[in-house]
Amino acid sequence: MKTTAAARAPGTDLSSAGTDGRALARRRLVLWLAPPMLWFTAFMLVPYAIMFFYSLGSMDYVDFVPGFSPANYVKALTAEPYPDVLLKSTVNGLLTALLSSVVAFPLAMWMAFGLASPRRRALVSILVVLPWWASYLVKVYAWKTILGAEGVLNTALMAIGLVDEPLSVLLYNRFAVVLTLTYIFTPFAVLSIYAQLERIPRSLVEAARNLGATDGEIFRRIILPISVPGVLAGAVITFSLGFGDFVTPSLVGGPDDLMITNLVVNLLGVSMDRPLGSAIGVVVIAFSVLLLMAANAAERRTQVRF
Amino acid sequence: MQRPVEYGRQGWLRVSALVVLGFLYVPILTMVVFSFNENPVIGLPLRGPTLDWYRAFIDNEDVLESIVNGAMVAAGCVCLGVGFGLPAAIALDRHEFPGKAFFRRVVLLPIVLPGVITGVALLNFLVLVSIPLSLWTIVLGVGTALICITVTEVFARLQQLGRSQEEAAENLGATPAEVFFRVTLPNISTALWGSALITYAIAFDELAVTYLLTGRDNTLPMALWSMLRREATPEINAIATTVFAASAVVLVAGLWLSRGRGEQVQS
């Protein structure tokens, strides 16, 4: 893939092209590129720049004082609870990505290899995305109904005599947060892994079988290696969604389970500390850019062409 | 010699796949069942069934208004997605230009960036230029973040199509406008419909950006959020079940209608 230096200003080196065709191509490019470029500059890049500006200032009671100090970054990365919460959110994101991939894999594999007719594949694909169309808030709340002390699960466990009193370890803790996040975002992982597995030619699997490979060997040496880009693509999305969620922790998590986005919301609302909130925002943006670049590189390195 | 089961048809695989599929429906089932439960708190024991919560929903004008608001916001987001995502995808696929890698990264960033951060950045901006918060600012924030959906979907389709058809049309004397409207657009129409559908669904259910950028008028998730924080009654389940059923019908119908055209493009 051809990449151009990001630093060069758009449109500077195309003007040297002399022929009519090039000029025409350039005009067409401007036609397509200018509207989205202006839009993204005005409503993404400028807001990010403003956020950066705020992050370097400070608060004098309720008034913002512009400045040029890294103090908010130092605070965001060293003063408790911020680094701790940043780490916790990252771990929650990783757990979400890992568990959704593991849960999604058999379903994606069955869709790709177990279902012969395109009609059935389409049907199961619809069944996978359908739950995702139900209100996200109500799905999170449903887990509260399931996991609570008088919830569906505890009642069922007590009814069959497996436990004598309701399990309290099910709700208002990290387990509930990660379970709920995994549940919400698993459809993304399924679709992404399925899209990759679907590309594997059946003949490859058949050839391996004819040469005497066992099912386990086929899985380990064909399916798993080829699935990597799909797993990664799904994991990047599920990680980001898990990392940045602020609803699930406040509904099914305990007091210690608040994530970084909850803190940012609180900093802006309750504590009126816009500079610190902005600094955390900039840190998360930087983190996201790195993640996107790493994902891109990993995708390019692991993708297989048939 | 007995032929082994075809790969992918092993019993354990089917069972675990179905278990996962079931897992995806457990909370949905919970949502539906408790929408008919007489108990005024969402939970056991089951009593009823009753339609009271559906009646409460139909009488709840705030919620009905929030649904209309949300539908309009989502439609606005789809317009932004198509209006800016389509040209961005064409520029990325058909042209080389300086700063392309940077442009791509900016466009795709919202995929990995938490909505709260997008919301905070835009909120700072809107406060600074003193634009009052309203449903329009939600469209601005959510719609801009979701442009990446149209870009990725349409870009993937353009890559898959290649340029031969467009070049053939050009060689036969079609103007650029004719090439676009009669060759490119029909070829990517299913990708566009698909991304519009996804954008609509996400925008309708979006909370993080909306939470920060909302003015006086609420969308449905905001209305549900405040209901959940005050006192959660099964009315919430009734609302969500109704909206879910309606979206499921629209989704399945949409997929059904676009199916024929989708297969043409593949071949």
Image: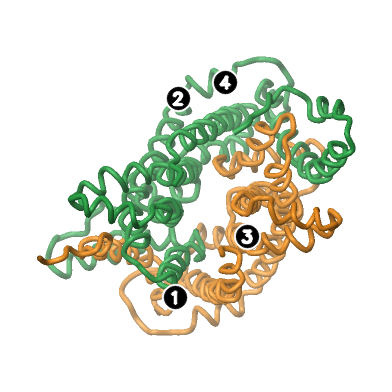
Residues at discs 4 and 2 in contact (Cβ within 8 Å): no
Vertical order, B1 against B55 (above or below): above
- What chain is tagged by disc 4? A
* SS at mark 1 in the image: helix
Residue at 12% in and 66% down: B2
On the image, the x and y values in percent for residue B262 come to 58, 67
Which residue in the protein does label 2 denote?
A80
Which residue in the protein does label 3 denote?
B191
Q: Nearer the viewer, residue A169 or A191?
A: A191
Q: Which mark is residue A73?
A: 4
Tag in front: 4 or 2: 4
Quarter of the image with the C terminus of chain B in it: bottom right
Three-letter code, disc 2: Glu
Three-letter code, disc 3: Ala
Question: Sequence-wise, which precedes: disc 3 or disc 1?
Answer: 1
Q: Report how far apart the C-alphas of labels 2 and 1 lie in the structure.
A: 42 Å
Three-letter code, disc 4: Tyr
Question: Sequence-wise, which precedes: disc 4 or disc 2?
Answer: 4
Q: Residues within 10 Å of mark 4 (few under 14, many from 20)?
A: many
Q: Residues within 10 Å of mark 3 (few under 14, many from 20)?
A: many
